[in-house]
DNA sequence: TTGTACGCGTTATCAT
DNA sequence: ATGATAACGCGTACAA
């Protein structure tokens, strides 16, 4: 627990000199610097970042605000991989991460700015937040730099990173159309997810472009959950034998659809083609392996942190959004329809 | 950015009174407290935990030290679920989490105590560390309270949480023996993993108890990685057609073994029974679904944080270790051997 | 019940 | 090139 004071005493100099020597200022004699560095090492000194942050008014800390950090199963791998990217990128530039988990209830108890200011975070990365969560508006109103993952919000100090969800959905649907499908349904997430709207847009655009009908009753809601998707798909597929393909807004929901199809004794892909979204680890191992739209989750996190730290470093306006490409991975759940 | 000073000025009292009023001390007039609370709210005040920590010498922060936080795939879900548990438990008692990711290289650059003291963490939870990592000894030598996940280290300020790996392995092997298997191999992780030793011990003990031979050449190393397990299993299974069952020290390696078996045209479970360890999400979806030993990862994290915070709160000696039960989940990769 | 004064460990300003 | 001193925001003896 040695402090610069201890070093100063031991080395016979003032605290000022110690501080400057250790921080690499040029206006300190080489000999005294050496001496100070030696005694610092000898005393096993480590600086107290708390004190430093207090006086400098910079904490070198980023808040990682994750909504519903839990074992929902749905976003698990997604959240984790994004986090890895954030962590790598942030530590590259010397920022530490402090983890806040929140949910709709907590958000009512403590305001966003309070949360941030208490811990003096310099900026925030926001993940898994829903469009109707109170924090979104608070973020925009506050002047704490923030980057959203997968929510397209912009503001003076607000940016976001996402993948091209519209185009991703288009790729998926185009793939099905190219195979010859014309009756294509969609299993969507829920209305509070920004990506849901985007993916639906892509789905509808691609159908329209191909001259196919867009039918509202062909779009189901699976709440991004496997069991919900299954129970939504089962009656639908039963009632609509003409449907030969389903585009799912997440891999997990695709799993649910696969289960429903199995119960209806529909063969995949012969009777029903399925395309997912995300490319979670699981999708490679399903039976048959799932065709899906792959998002680079790690990269999303990495870019998010990069965006944020660049906002933090510069006062000049800076690029505040990033849209990553995603790509279609064709596996074995898609084939031409039987006629 | 209002401070207690601002409140004091506005409310016409001293900072001391503000501090005491806001911290719920009893020796402050109800009327003044009310007045102070009102102006605090009006000024949108939030306390600066940095300053508070500095003076109290308590940061209310736990360091979450994760080794190799990356997309290795192997420990992904494991790490994530443990983290969820830690987070829930820690936030229950008002601790925040600061994320440190480390690896063998980083550990040489900055010492454990330095890392901790810089950020003034009160305690640490250590995850995914290898037995030959330098930090382990440093943790023991330091007096910063620490709880390890899955490494059985004890010390004055050091505890751990783990599952009963020996017994878990025994359950798995017993299950195979009960089915009638006698030639049972093991796919182990690597020598730097504490759990590897434990699981091997259970494997050998159960064989011995059943009067079966323990053969060193029946124990392979898959480094906890799927491809490594596959390439280790392939030649082994080819050379040892007498082997009818393999116990794997992780589900991921079980996947590798399944791939090797497929290449050798061995049917699972008819020609080869496989038991995994962990019960990752994936194992439910493999083809066929994997029989495995399930660990409650969330609970491990929850207990780890609980252990640590109780060590932090009390100066009295306290329970410093926790061993959780795990259970065998029989799915479809195990069956009696063909004769 | 309230206020004064000091200290936590550090950096920054201004002298010297 | 070096040192005194103030300041960051807060908690707390001690005094009143």
Image (spheres, coloured by chain):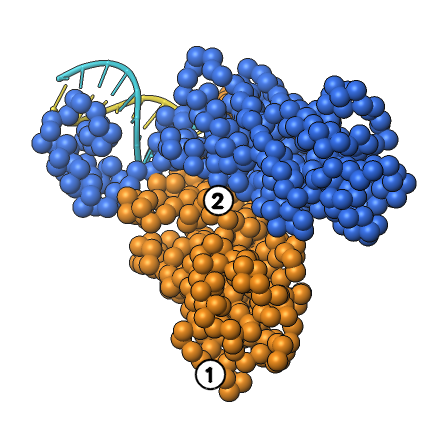
Chain colours: A blue, B orange, C cyan, D yellow
Chain under callout 1: B
Question: Residue A300, percent across and down?
Answer: 53, 31
Q: Residue at x 33, y 55 (%)?
A: B133
Left or right? Give the position of A275 relative to B132: right
Q: Which residue is mark 1?
A: B213
User: Going by the picture, which residue comes out furthest to the right?
Assistant: A239
Q: Is residue A241 above or below residue A195?
A: below
Residue A219 visible from this viewpoint: no
Q: How many marks?
A: 2
Left or right? Give the position of B36 relative to B224: right
Nearer to us in this view, B180 or A76: B180
Q: Nearer the viewer, mark 1 or mark 2?
A: 1
Nearer to us in this view, A327 or B64: A327
Chain under callout 2: B
Q: Is residue A238 above or below residue B155?
A: above
Q: Which mark is residue B224?
A: none
Q: CA distance from mark 1 to mark 2?
A: 38 Å
Nearer to us in this view, B291 or B118: B291
Mark 2 falls on what kind of element? loop
Q: Is residue A265 above or below residue B262?
A: above
- In the figure, residue A313 lies in which quadrant? top left
Question: Residue A50, percent across and down?
Answer: 38, 35
Q: Which mark is residue B71?
A: 2
Quick one: label 1 or label 2, which is nearer the N terminus? 2
User: Going by the picture, which residue comes out furthest to the front?
Assistant: A339
Quadrant assignment for the C terminus of chain A: top right
Mark 2, residues whose alpha carbon is within 10 Å: few (<14), some, or many (≥20)?
A: some
Residue A264 visible from this viewpoint: yes
Mark 1 falls on what kind of element? loop
Question: Residue B253, percent across and down?
Answer: 51, 59
């Amino acid at each position: 627990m040695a402090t610069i004071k201890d070093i100063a005493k031991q080395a016979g100099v003032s605290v000022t000199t110690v501080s400057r020597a250790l921080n690499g200022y040029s206006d300190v004699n080489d000999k005294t610097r050496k001496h100070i560095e030696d005694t610092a090492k000898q005393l096993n000194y480590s600086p107290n970042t708390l004190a430093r942050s207090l006086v400098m008014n910079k904490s070198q800390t980023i808040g990682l605000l994750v909504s519903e950090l839990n074992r929902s199963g749905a976003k698990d791998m997604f959240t984790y991989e994004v986090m890895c990217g954030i962590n790598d990128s942030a530590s590259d530039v010397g920022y530490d991460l402090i983890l806040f988990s929140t949910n709709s209830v907590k958000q009512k108890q403590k305001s966003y700015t309070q949360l941030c200011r208490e811990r003096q975070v310099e900026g925030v990365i926001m993940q898994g937040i829903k469009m109707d969560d109170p924090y979104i508006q608070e973020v925009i109103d506050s002047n704490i730099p923030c980057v959203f993952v997968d929510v397209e919000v912009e503001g003076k100090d607000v940016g976001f990173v996402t993948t091209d969800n519209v185009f991703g959905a288009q790729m998926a649907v185009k793939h099905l159309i190219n195979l010859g499908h014309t009756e294509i349904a969609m299993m969507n997430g829920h209305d509070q997810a920004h990506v849901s709207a985007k993916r639906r847009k892509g789905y509808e655009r691609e159908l329209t472009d191909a001259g196919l009908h867009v039918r509202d009753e062909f779009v189901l809601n699976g709440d991004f959950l496997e069991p919900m998707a299954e129970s939504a798909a089962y009656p639908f597929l039963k009632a609509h034998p003409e449907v030969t393909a389903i585009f799912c807004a997440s891999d997990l929901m695709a799993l649910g659809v696969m289960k429903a199809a199995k119960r209806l004794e529909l063969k995949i892909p012969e009777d029903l083609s399925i395309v997912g979204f995300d490319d979670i680890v699981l999708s490679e191992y399903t039976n048959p392996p799932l065709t899906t739209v792959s998002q680079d989750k790690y990269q999303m996190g990495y870019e998010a942190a990069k965006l944020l730290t660049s906002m933090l470093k510069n006062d000049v306006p800076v690029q505040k959004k990033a849209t990553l490409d995603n790509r279609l991975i064709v596996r074995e759940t898609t084939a031409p329809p039987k006629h």
